[in-house]
Structures are given as structure tokens and as C-alpha cells.
Image: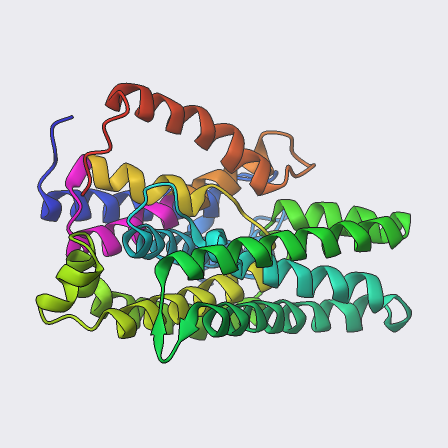
Amino acid sequence: MKRIPPKKALLVLAVLVFVAAWGGLMAGASVLGFADIPVLLGWSEPAPGAWNPTIVFWELRLPRVLTGLLVGAALSLSGAMMQGLFRNPLADPGLIGVSSGAALGAVAAIVLSGPLGGVAQARLLPGAALVGAWVATWIILRAGSRHGSASVATLLLAGIAINAFAGAFIGLCMFLATDTQLRSLNFWMLGSLGGASWESVALLAPFCALLFLGAPRMARGLNAFSLGEAEAGHLGCNPEAVKRWVIALTALGVGGCVAQTGMIGFVGLVVPHLFRITVGPDHRWLLPGSALLGAALLVMADTLSRTVAAPAEIPIGIVTAAVGAPFFLALLWRQKRKFDWL
């Protein structure tokens, strides 16, 4: 596949993000058009007898699109760093157990907080998911470190163990859940941006901001890691610092995202690989490119999830898997098993 110049690719992706955001703001059960813009901006009043789109735009769609942009960028950026750290194009943010830890915390909050009521439970759930993600990260770092040195293979095995434990406990919680709780669990496990609000955007933004600011500093180290851990050390890179920072940033970003939107799969796996095979493996371009592409694709997936069966809403995890899996298989078929990214 002919590669695209990185600067040109980033420019195209920036335009794609704008188009995806615009489509997400305008499309839905009630379609907005250019004629509604003066009303949305407060320049004029809606016509007598016409519906007022102001609440739909400012209170529902805008925070939802912003959440989609933040979550898509964070998941894709985390996936790119994970793939660089483990030197494996099949790695994703869930590989080290961060997503499973967050899911475990949220599921436990849903099942165990039944007597608290819906409002208290809704406020407890994001905090429980964050605690689950951070506890899982602490266990992984402790289990994978020895005398101040962390082994990538041991970190991977610790993540697999966390995933297995979390999966078993989540299964137990689903077995004990009531019918109402089970519906909430199933919808949350498949991911949704339906609960997005200005409050959730404010809670999510600091975690994503720290991830976006810290990730570019990992680019040089991840480029060195592509040659091997020992070779990275010879090039002046601190492998231990890179491993710890990458995992910490991933836990920060993914934990915040899962806490607000639930489990959204396939984004962190497909997006970095797609950008890598079209532009190249240099993390100086791969990290921002993955963030832009992930933001655009997740907003488009969310727009599809709430319009294809309107007024009902399909969980976004179903859309990302149904669209992403065949597309990813087509890319692999075209590459003919040649992962030319190292």
C-alpha cells in the first residue's frame, strides 16, 4: 500500500474530524439544518408553531459529540502506545487489564448499590470504574516489577490474569443481578454515549487532557522500543520510565473513558493499525494521527448508532465491532499477513 505523507494525512484527518462532528450535531431523530443555525446561536426566534432546536443542540448533541471526540481520541491514542510498547499490532488498551478493571468497578457498583437508588448509583458508577482501573494498574505494575525493573512479558501476563479475574467476577455479578440491573449491565458493557452531559464532559476532559499532553513525550521512546528493549537503552532511552509512563497514561485515559461511556471495543485496536499501514510507524505522527482518526470514527459510529434505528439507539460497541471487524479483516487480507510496521 502506498503511504501518504504524514503532514498531508494529519490535515485530511483534521478535516474529517470537523465533518464527523458537524454530522453528529446535525443528524438524529430530529434533523437540524442550516436554517436552524440563527436560532441555535440566539440570533432569532423559532417560527410560530415550529419546534425549538436549542435544547436538542446545546444540551444533548453537543456534549455527546464532544464526549465522542474525547473518548475516540483517547482510546486510539492508548492503543497506539500499547502496540508500540508491546511491539505487537494486535495489542489494545484492554490488553493490560485496565478496561476490565474499570468494568469490574462499574459492574460492582451497579449490582451492590441497588438500595441507593438510580441517582446515587449514577453518581457512584464513574468513581467506581476509575477506582477499578487504577487498582488494576497498580496490581499490574507491582506484579510486573522486580527490583525496580518491569518486564514487558510479565506485564502482559499480569494483564491477562486481571482480565480473567475481572471476567469471572463480572459473570458472578451478572448472575446475581436483578432483571433491571441486568439490562443496565448489558447496555453498559456494550458502551454508549447516551449518558453524555456537560457534567460528564467536565469530568472526562482532565483525564484526556493529561493523556494528550503526556503521550507525545513517549514518541521517541516508543520509536526506540521498535528496535528492542535493550537497543532502546543503548540509544539513550530509559525503558523502565517509558513502560511505566505508557501504562500510567493508558490507565488514566482509558479508565476515565470507560467510567463515562462503558466498554467500547475495537477502536484502540483498528485505528492505530489503519494509520500505521497508510502513513508509517513513526510515533511522532502515529500518535496524533491515531487520536484524530479515532475521534472522527467514534463520532461517526455514534451518529450511526442513534440514527439507523431511531428513535431507538443501538449500543455503540455493536456498531464499532460490526463495522470495524470486517474492515480490519479486509486490511489484513490486503496486507497478506505482512505487518510492515516495525
Residue 60 seen by the camera: no
* Residue drawn at 63 percent across, 52 percent down: 164
Q: Nearer the viewer, residue 188 or 16?
A: 188
Relative to 108, is 49 above or below? above
Number of on-image labels:
0
Say which quarter of the image contains residue 215: bottom left
Residue 180 in picture, x, y percent from top left: 87, 51
- The magenta-colored residue range is 278-296
> Which residue is located at x 64 percent, y 69 percent?
126
Quarter holding the N terminus is top left
Q: Residue at x 17, y 46 (%)?
A: 281
Taking depth in this image into account, of 256 and 84 the one nearest to the observer is 84
Q: Main secondary structure of the magenta part?
A: helix
Q: Which residue is the extreme one toward the front? A: 147
Q: Position of residue 60 (x, y in %)?
A: 58, 56
* Viewport quadrant of the C terminus: top left
Whole-percent x, y for residue 153 in the image: 39, 56
Toward the viewer: 103 or 149?
Answer: 149
Where 218 sits versus 22, above or below?
below
Q: Residue furthest bottom?
A: 147
Please give the name of the residue rendered at 70% of the width and 46% of the height, measured from the top-left corner.
Answer: 187
Q: Visible in this render: residue 149?
A: yes
Q: Is residue 239 above or below residue 300?
A: below
In this picture, residue 313 sits left or right of residue 172: left
Magenta span contains residue 14: no
